[in-house]
Every structure is written in structure tokens, then in C-alpha cells.
Amino acid sequence: MSSSTRRAQSVAVTGIGISCALGTGAEQVWRAVQSGVHGIGKTERLDVSTLSCRYAGEVRSVPAGVRRVGMRPDRATRLALAAVQEAVEGARLSLADHDSYRVGVAVGTSVGGLEHGERFHWDILKDGPGAAGRHRLTSYPLYTSADAISVAFRLRGPKVVLSNACAAGSNAIGYAVDAIREGRADIMIAGGVDVLDILSLAGFDSLNALDTEPCAPYSRSTGTSLGEGAAFLVLEAESFARDRGAAVLGHVLGYATTSDAYHATAPDPAGNGAYRAMRRSLAQASLTPEDVDYVNGHGTGTPTNDKAETKAVADLFAPAPPVPMSSTKSQVGHMLGAAGAMEAATCVLALRDGVLPPTVNVAEPGDLPRDLVANHARPQSLDVVVSNSFAFGGNNCSLVLGRRPASPADVPDHRVVITGTGPVTALGSGRQAFLEALRAGTSAIGAARLTDVSLSRTRRAAELDSAECRRHVDPAYARRLDQIGLLTLAASRLAVRDAGLRITKADAERIGMVFGTFSGPMQTVAQLSETIGTVGPHRVNPRLFPNSVMNAAAGHACLALQIRGPLSTLATGCVSGLSGLAYAADLVRRGEADVMLAVGADELTPLLHCGFDRLGLLSDDTLRPYAATAGGTVLGAGGAALVVESLEHALRRGATILAEVKGHAVTSDAYRVAGNDPSGAAWAECFTRALDHADMAPDDIGTVYGDARGTAAIDAAEVAAVSRVWQPGRVRLSNLSPYVGHVHSTTSLMSAVCAAETVRTGWSPDVPAPSAPGNVTPYLLAGAEAGRACLVTAANWGGTYASLVLAPYTGPAATARTAVG
């Protein structure tokens, strides 16, 4: 894998855009922060009359004059577009002057357009599926705001949506830093957006986590106040910013994520995960705690968070007293997925001006046992600050920001291999059963028996019995899990077992997880939404709410397996699983972990099936990818996990190596929100960039595992993309959707499981050629041979593409597994 494009330099912040409860515009918000005012007041937009808390950090005036994106943007998208526009203008960045494939976007969000999904559901409950507006479904997904940013600003580079709850905004900035340092982008627009939603308010209220007054972190600590808004940073390679003469506001010097593996909602009271995140992020920047001048805390105001975080900070600086610390959530509320981005922006402005932002609502500052910047901003020279974000599911993320650039620590370049897989599919679970079913040509598509599809016109599905998952999950733990939690834990356990991996206390901190999903916990969200729509928000079940966040399943899996290393959740639609595998490989390659689990899972629920049916995307029969006339897709459910490991670690423990990860890429077509460019140009560019990253040519690839799913837009674009890179008959095109259905983000990980077999034996599943038009037939009939690499690809409805290259492992002590079937 090529590392020649890596940059050993800091990443510069050249632009900031903010919209929150304190106003719109970074400078206006920063003045309000310094003045010690807060924007938390009585909630007006949503009816919270039945809840115990009436306060929130509401954006009173949502910017209207945003760039057009071919659709009527929802509230979250309007906030995101306005913040990005301010950041780009502040950076004096003329995006048209730059290679659009070298400019990308990373968005952190927890809620996205959830309100539109809720209204779709409530309309069905009230008047039936015919009354539910289809237009709501294109703004509901979490990735909508990222697609809109890409379209509005013509960004075709790496695109990702992070949804590890309250750590998402910080993780998005960290992911963007990686993209720049790895040489995949010169510029990244990174940040977060979330809006107040009745489900979030009702859920936090059900947990008794909301303060009945505006919150007071680190002092009263009787609950949090939710907020909303958007914050985005323009990030550039230091050399790139310098060459174009940009005014640099600050620098991102390092970041790290960790897992508590302690509890579904409560942080580890010892603060161990938070401590490790701070320590590792400083080490990335070749800094120590003695270099830190200020900590911007997560500081939610809940007693468990405030105690755990202050202990972690005290441990970090021991035996010296901790540096000054504060939480700006007391001024803007807890902005969930946008919180970390808002706080990072505040830290950059604090570094620029030499001012410590305050924690307001502190009644008796003299009684505090630590240096809390209470009620009023404080002038102080700052060089290095740490910004913390901690989340449900035990997700921790810490950013290190500096006033001056600093050379990062040396980064290794490990070879990355796959040593185990855990497919949980409608064809069977476990690598051997799955591959045997595919070799036999078995299809799981049929009439739905386990899922209520009475709301839909068609009854076709590729169903997975939950009992299949429960066979691989401890019965006591299974009771805590919803459908996606079962899929995730079952796949993870199978993969760990297949890899012969033992996770012990001694190595748990060097093992992590990246989770990718399209559907997320739809089953749980639908249950909560139905309660709100029919009974009222005050009746939300507190046992269900923690499972409603996108990263809950990953948190449960890490807790069950005691995984404490890097942890992240991707929600970039149908590319989430494959992008997660690429992210996991990067973390191993750079030495952030010895082993990562790349896991994907997607549910099949009545509401999800109904939504796709209302969009006219479902087939009445079977699923025929690449057919001359697109007949529609068939939805499936499933999970898949792959154990990704450094070669050194795999050889040291005597693991059997299935394949090597050679390279990957993500692109966007910036074509249309919820639409795909039929030319396939950006998808083909994704192929080419993945091959370049792998130091390979097109003729080195024997098989391409496609993501066509029986729909006209995706299938035609894929065929166009393949034909741009490979001549007919020079590569074999395979596809799993006729066998497992369209399992959203997880199909591509199932394809990766197959590809690990293909690179060794040359076998891959057939796609029936008679259903295909002439221009794709040579690709379907082309032969493959053992020992050649595979390219696995995935596409999302909004024009995001991911590709990853797997090759046979060649090197010392390689052990070949017995062929399956």
C-alpha cells in the first residue's frame, strides 16, 4: 500500500462557521461566549408541556439564504449549509480553483432529519401508508446534510457521516485530519449538525437526565440542557494553506477515540476511557499533559459525566493540579452530534484571542475544588488545548488543538490483513455456511414470513430469523438488545471466533471497532416514535431510548467483548460498511490499534420496507441486478464483521491470513441530493483512486464485487463506471444481491467476505447473464483465476462511492485455509 502521499504535518484551521442558540456567525457567537451569556430558554418550536424540562438551547432564527441543492432542505440541512458557507467564505477559499476530488466533507450528527421520519410514521399511523409524504424520506437519512454540502459546494472528495452520538462532531474533525494527513484530500470541510427533536428530548427526560433549569456543568450538576445548531471548520494541509496564503486560525494536532466497555449510557466512573483518549491524542502530537494550557470539557451537567470527566482530567495532570477547565454547554446546550464541533470551533477562537471561555450558571465558584473558569471569560495566553467529547455507548473522543503547528509523532505503515470473518445472513451464519450456500446458488429471497409487510405493495424480502443471531449471543445479554444489536454482536462473535482471537484485559486497549450502518436501530426508533405519536412524549420507555442512537449496537458489542480501543460509527448510507472497513484498516496501518473489528449491520422492519415501497424502489418478484429493465430491489437484513489486523500481530499470534487490504478510496459525484450521476464518472474515479492507493493497475484486478441492486439509477451508474476503467471481458463482475437481497451498508462487507475467498481460489458467485443488457454481459461471463486481487465497491443513493482492494497475502509464515465447499 502506497504511503508516498502521506503528510507529516499539522492540519490548519482556516475558516469557521457557527449557528447555535447564541446566534448565527462565528464572531457573534464568540462575543456572546466571552460575555458569559447563555442562549438556553423556554422551548418554543416543540411541544414539551408534558415533559419535566421546558428549557433548551434553541436556534431562534434558522438561516434561509443558503445555496440551492435541488430540494427543499430540512432544518438540519439549512443550518449545516449556512455554517459551511460562512466557514468557506471566512477561509477566503475559492473552491472552483481546486481539484474537486481533493476536497471532501465529514459530518457528525446524531439526529439529522429525524423529524421528517417521525412525521412520515405519524401520517401512516393516522391515515395509512398512502397518506405519508414520500418527500420526507429523502431528508430523513443522517447523510442528507453531507450530500447537500457536497452538491452545494461541488465537493467530490472523501465524504463521511459519523454518528457516534455526542462524540460525532469531534470524530468527524479527526476523520478529516486523517484524510488530509494520508494524502487523500488537501481540504476537508468538517463539523457537525443536530437539531432539537421531540424523541431526543423525551428520551433524555425519561432517563431523568435533563435539568429543570438551564444546566450548570461541574457545579450544580443536576442534569443537562439539550441544544441545537451547526459548526464547521475548513481544514487544510499546513503546506497547502501556506502556499495559498491563507490566514491560519489554529491547528488540529491530534485526536483519538476509545471505548469504555462499561455501560450502555453511563460513563466509566473511573474515567479510564476518557483518560486514554486524552493521553493518546496528545501522544499523536508528540505532546505531554505538561504542554496543555486548557481543557474544554464535555461537561454535560449530569452528575455521572461531570464526576467521571473531572476524575479523568485530574488523573491526566497528576501529580500537578489540573489546568483551567470549562464547558460551553452551559451557554448553548448539549448539541449532541454537533457538540464536539462547536467546542472545537470555540477552542480555535480561544487560541486565536488568548481567552478562556467560561462555564456559566455557577452559583458558588469559590467552593469548587478545581480551576473552573466560572461565569466570566478569562484572558490567558494559550498554546495547546484539549477538547473532550464523550457519548452513550462508551464512545470517547479527544481533540488536541494548538496555536502553532507542531510535527506529529512518527506514524508506522503496517501491512494490514484480514484474519477472520463473521457473516450473519439470510443464507446462514458463519463463513463456511455462508460460502457453501453461495456456491450452491441458494437465494434467500422469497415471500416475507417473519416481517409484517402489510403496509407495502410487495411482500418480497430476504429475511433473517433473529433466532439465528441468538445462537451466537449470551441469552442474558440478548435480552438487552434490539434487532440491530443482535446482528452486530452475533457477527462480531463469529468473526472473533473465526480469527482465533482472544481478547484479554492485557490487550483490550489495542483492539477496537468501526461500525457501519444504513438503517440503524429502526426497530427501536419506530417503537419510540409510535409512543410519542399515539400516547405522548412523556410515556417514552427509558429502557428503549439508549438503543435508539446509531452507535448503541457497537457500544453493546464492545461491552460484551470488552473491547476498549478505538471506536467509531459511520452512517454514510449504503457505503458505511465498506468505508468502515477502510477506516479500520487505516487505524491499524497507523498503529492506533493492533486489531480492529469492521462491523456492519442493517435491520429489516415494517416501516423501512414501507418507506422503500413508497419510493417505488421495491421489486414484485426477485432481484435482478444489471437487468435491461430495472425491476426494483428486495430488502434484506444481516450483519457482517471482519477482523482486521496488522501483519506483525497476526504472524506473532500464528493467525491464518485470509487476504491483505491493499488500498481504498471514497468519492462523491456532487450530482443531486438522493440522486446519482448516471455517467458513473465519480464512481470510476473511486475505482482508480483505490487502485492508485494499492499501487495497482486495472489489469491486476480479477473480480469486481459490485453493489447494483435492481434499481435503474445505481445499476446503470455502476455499469458505466466499470466500463470506464476495464475493457469488456478483462474483469469479472460479481454481485451478492440476488442471493442475500439488498442489505444496505452490509452487502459490501458480505462481498468482502466472499472476496477473501476469491483471491485465494478464483471462485465468485455468478450473476445470471440472460437478465443483463449486452454492454454488461462480458463482465458477468468473464472468468477469474486464483491469486488475483479483488475490488469491492459500494454506492449510496446520494452519490457517495467507496472502493476497497483485497489481494492474496504473500509473505512469511502464510497459512492457507482449506477450501470451503
Image: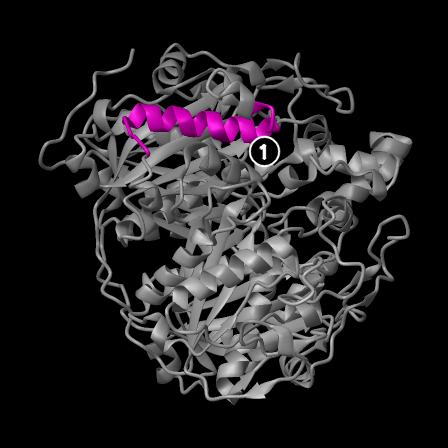
* Left or right: where 655 falls relative to 493: left
* Left or right: where 221 falls relative to 739: right
For the C terminus, give its image quadrant: top left
Q: Residue furthest left?
A: 812
Indicate how the structure is coloured in the image: one colour
Identify the amino acid type marked 1. Thr
The main secondary structure of the magenta stretch is: helix
Q: Which residue is mark 1?
A: 711
Q: Secondary structure at mark 1?
A: loop
Q: Is residue 154 above or below residue 381?
A: above
* Dot 1 crowding, Cα within 10 Å, few <14, some 14–19, many 20+: many
Question: Is 146 contained in the magenta span?
Answer: no
Residue 736 appears in the picture as rendered:
no
Question: Is 488 contained in the magenta span?
Answer: yes
Over which residues does the magenta segment extend? Answer: 478-503
* Left or right: where 500 falls relative to 94: left
Q: Position of residue 626 (x, y in %)?
A: 49, 29
Q: Is residue 60 above or below residue 448?
A: below
Q: Is residue 783 above or below residue 601?
A: above
